[in-house]
Image (tube, rainbow, N blue to C red):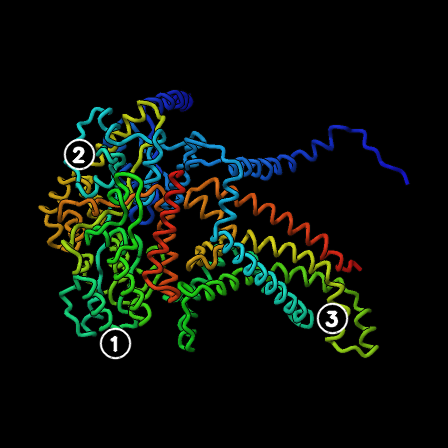
Amino acid sequence: MRRTVFPHKLLPWLLLAPQLAITLIFFYWPAAQAFRQSVLREDPFGLSSKFVGLANFRKVLNDPAYLNAMQVTVVFSVLVAFFAMGIALFLAVQVEKIIRGKGLYRTLMIWPYAVAPAIAGMLWLFMFNPSFGTLAWPLRQLGIAWNPLLNGDQAMALVVAAATWKQISYNFLFFVAGLQAIPKSLLEAAAIDGATKRHAFWTIVFPLLTPTTFFLLVVNTVYALFDTFGIIHAVTSGGPGKSTETLVYKVYNDGFVNLIMGDSAAQSVILMVIVIALTAFQFRFIEKRVHYG
Amino acid sequence: MKTVNLCVVGLMALPVAAQAQTEISWWHAMTGANSEVVEKIAADFNASQSDYVVKPVFKGTYPETLNAGIAAFRAGQAPDIIQVFDVGTGVMMGAQGAIKPVAEVLTEAGFNFDKSEYLPGIVGYYSSPAGEMLSFPYNSSSPILYYNKDIFEKAGLDVNTPPATWAEVWAAARQIKSSGAATCGYTSTWLTWIHTENFAAWNNVSWASNENGLAGTPELAVDGPLFVKHFQEMADLAKEGVFVYGGRTSEAKQNFTSGECGILTESSGGLGDIVKAGINYGIGQLPYDESAEGAPQNTVPGGASLWVMGGKSDEAYKGVGTFFNYLSQTEVQQYLHEVSGYLPVTMAAYEATKSSGFYETNPAREVPITQMMGKEPTENSKGVRAPNLPQIRDILNEEFEKMLAGQQTAQEAMTAAATRGNAAIKDATGG
């Protein structure tokens, strides 16, 4: 095989420049700032600044509120990723079975993705706010003491539901594409061999969907960790108590509400490490079980 | 040919005109009707003289405006004037070098600044421990009691006598619930501001050491017996379903305007929404605890004030001083008070509103002022200050929520809040 050699030395760099510039300005530079801030203790205005080494990290990691935020994040992320992917897969499989109006159903399923997180949060809040929520009243009539303003588990259920609802569309889209890529001949052969629908799904469809599922797992984890900030901010602001305060919400709260820059920066750095580790772990171990066909 | 000439002349004239006028930027957090007041005041000031142009810019909620100001200062792009809410006062006071005291700005601009012309309760809150006025009190409010007269009537309560003490509030609230007049007896916005900060001042008990933090670093005293008693009573009412919790800020107003709750404690600045809701409401003083000695004392202001940022030109400061002087004029203050529901800042404006007969037609509008001015403030009632008050309020709210959910008693909640709050203060002061 002949290797193609491009004569230009400068052109590739020029073509890469916009992307490099964006990455440098919007990722490396802020990340470097976060590292710098995380070893300093500063007043909000930056009038006095003191180097404290790793003291901010020690403080954050010994803070029971931080450990609580970690727990909340794990519970929240696992629930959101599980439900968002599970429900999307179920819906995608059901839509495939429809003969008429497939396109319409698909379009309707994809719609919620266009809704901004904060708006999605407000929608759910309007439905389930204990004082003016349209669905809170029937819930109470059913004898459920619905009050997410004081009940932490109910508040968690509410933000998980809102975050899941918003992400289902995205997952649905990928699962539909994944399902369409599965050759019909395989399913027909299985049917001839006398496999039941359920059996065919778990032995043929699901394994062939693993690349999609794996990709979505990574995306959904990152989504649950970061993109759900708007929903939590709009629905619970981390309350009641600290029962829906995730790691990202705590970074915001400590940095922009309580104005403790050093702690907030140290938390961002820890969060960055967690995400890198998590993604690396997913690629190293879970990907081994992915069947690329 | 003529039009071309005119254009050239016009172009040449523009920069000259722009140079002659100094621009003053004013970042604020006012929405709705209150933002129209900001625009009108700025426009009137600009029309009243030709040396300065005040440009108001809306920057989002109170915390967002404060954050925008801080970020801009760090980038060397701070505005001339920034509106900062009451809880941000400690943060601004700690930022010496980032701000310029208002008293200094006014004096240097050549105006005769006399502190005694201003309402003492308000000006005291925005002054340094040495007594220098640091920021200009633009919009001040005070918490009052609202009640639904229709619900009172249905419950067999006296429609013309609002409950005056907390014990009376609890009794009325229980009667509202048990008589079936409403599903909820009582609710309140801003538990921290109304039930700790104002509760302390109004009942003359200490919220924190060092004059509640005004004279130095505070150590919280919110685990005192009167607070514990008060919050245990609220926790009991919550358990009975008589008290309904609405949220950390002003969400509970909804529970009142929707007719779900019969009694509400809320800022006087919330009046507009209650009028708009069209319910048959009455207003009373903030309730006090009859077992507290000397209660009711006086309430402390909430709302926001205008801070002048440091490092600006002399010309800009002269403009800011001229603008603040304009703001404190009686007609401007009277307009601000009558339209927005916030309190007037000067004695003259208060007197003018009184003599105009405004309070005779709107008697409720005087309640927040008389509450604040009723008595000479004591060391417990000048207001509260902490370098990290937003964080302290968060901590208190978290403990209240756990208490109201039945996870802990009032004693446990207040002890935990004081312990956690004091640790946070110690940390914020670098101790």
Q: Amino acid at mark 1?
A: Ser
Q: Quadrant of the C terminus of chain A?
A: bottom right
Q: Residue at x 81, y 79 (%)?
A: A194
Between marks 3 and 1 in the image, the one whose residue lies nearer the viewer: 1
Q: Is residue A270 left or right of residue B13?
A: right
Label 3, secondary structure: give it: helix
> Mark 1 = which residue?
B178
Callout 2 environment at 10 Å: few (<14), some (14 to 19), or many (20+)?
some
Amino acid on which disc 3 is placed: Trp
Contact, mark 1 vs mark 2 (Cβ under 8 Å)? no
Q: Element under label 2? A: helix
Rendered image: mark on residue A202: 3
Instruction: Check the image and name the residue furthest to the left.
Output: B355
Q: Name the foreground residue: B188 vs B393.
A: B393
Name the quadrant containing residue B411: bottom left
The percent coordinates of residue A268 (x first, y second) are 54, 44
In the figure, A61 relative to A113: above or below? Answer: above
Give me the C-alpha separation between circle 3 and circle 1.
Answer: 58 Å
Rendered location of residue B363, percent (x, y): 14, 55
Spatial CA distance of label 2 from label 3 is 80 Å
Q: Is residue B58 left or right of residue B293?
A: right
Quick check: A22 above or below B232?
Answer: above
What residue is shown with label 2?
A: B115
